[in-house]
Image (spheres, grey):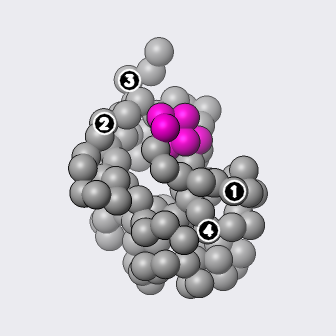
C-alpha cells in the first residue's frame, strides 16, 4: 500500500483525496477510484476524455506536451493554454505526490 496522495476536484467542485500508486498514470488513478473519467482510448492519447486541469505552478514543472496531446487538447471543452493535460500522459512521480487536479468539463 502506498502513501502517495492525490486530491481531485470533481465537476461539481467537491474535493476528494485518493491514493496514487507509483505504477499508475494519473488517468488510471482517477478511473480506478470511480471518478467520471471516460478514458475512451484506454490511455493512448487518442481522445481527450481524461482531460484535467493542473495549477500553473505544477503545470510549469511537467515536461512538454506532445504534438498529439496538444492537438487533442485544443479541441477539448474548457482547454487552457497553461494547465490542460491529458491525465493518461502523466505518470506518477514524487514531484506530483500530493498534487491537486480538477476534472475538465465532460466532452
Question: Are there few (<14), some (14-19), or many (20+) residues within 10 Å of tag 1?
Answer: few
Q: Which residue is mark 2?
A: 17
User: Which numbered disc flags the more N-terminal residue, 2 or 4?
Assistant: 2
Q: Position of residue 89 (x, y in %)?
A: 62, 57
Mark 2–mark 1 CB contact (< 8 Å): no
User: Which numbered disc flags the more N-terminal residue, 4 or 1?
Assistant: 1
Could you tell whether 99 is left or right of 22 in the image? left
User: Which numbered disc flags the more N-terminal residue, 3 or 1?
Assistant: 3
Q: Which residues are magenta?
A: 28-34
Residue 33 colored magenta? Answer: yes
Q: CA distance from mark 2 to mark 1?
A: 24 Å
Q: Which residue is mark 3?
A: 3
Give the secondary structure at mark 3. loop
Mark 2–mark 4 CB contact (< 8 Å): no
Q: Nearer the viewer, residue 97 or 40?
A: 40
Give the secondary structure at mark 2. strand
Question: Are there few (<14), some (14-19), or many (20+) residues within 10 Å of tag 4?
Answer: many
Identify the main secondary structure in magenta. Answer: helix
In the displayed structure, 45 sits above or below 95; it is below
Which residue of the protein is positioned furthest toward the left in this rendering? 14
Amino acid at each position: 500500500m502506498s502513501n502517495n496522495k492525490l486530491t481531485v476536484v470533481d465537476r461539481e467542485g467537491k474535493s476528494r483525496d485518493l491514493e496514487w500508486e507509483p505504477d499508475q498514470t494519473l488517468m488510471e488513478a482517477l478511473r480506478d477510484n470511480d471518478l467520471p473519467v471516460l478514458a475512451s482510448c484506454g490511455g493512448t492519447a487518442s481522445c481527450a476524455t481524461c482531460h484535467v486541469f493542473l495549477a500553473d505552478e505544477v503545470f510549469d514543472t511537467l515536461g512538454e506536451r506532445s504534438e498529439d496531446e496538444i492537438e487533442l487538447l485544443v479541441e477539448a471543452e474548457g482547454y487552457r493554454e497553461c494547465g490542460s493535460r491529458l491525465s493518461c500522459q502523466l505518470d506518477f512521480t514524487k514531484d506530483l505526490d500530493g498534487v491537486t487536479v480538477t476534472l475538465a468539463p465532460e466532452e
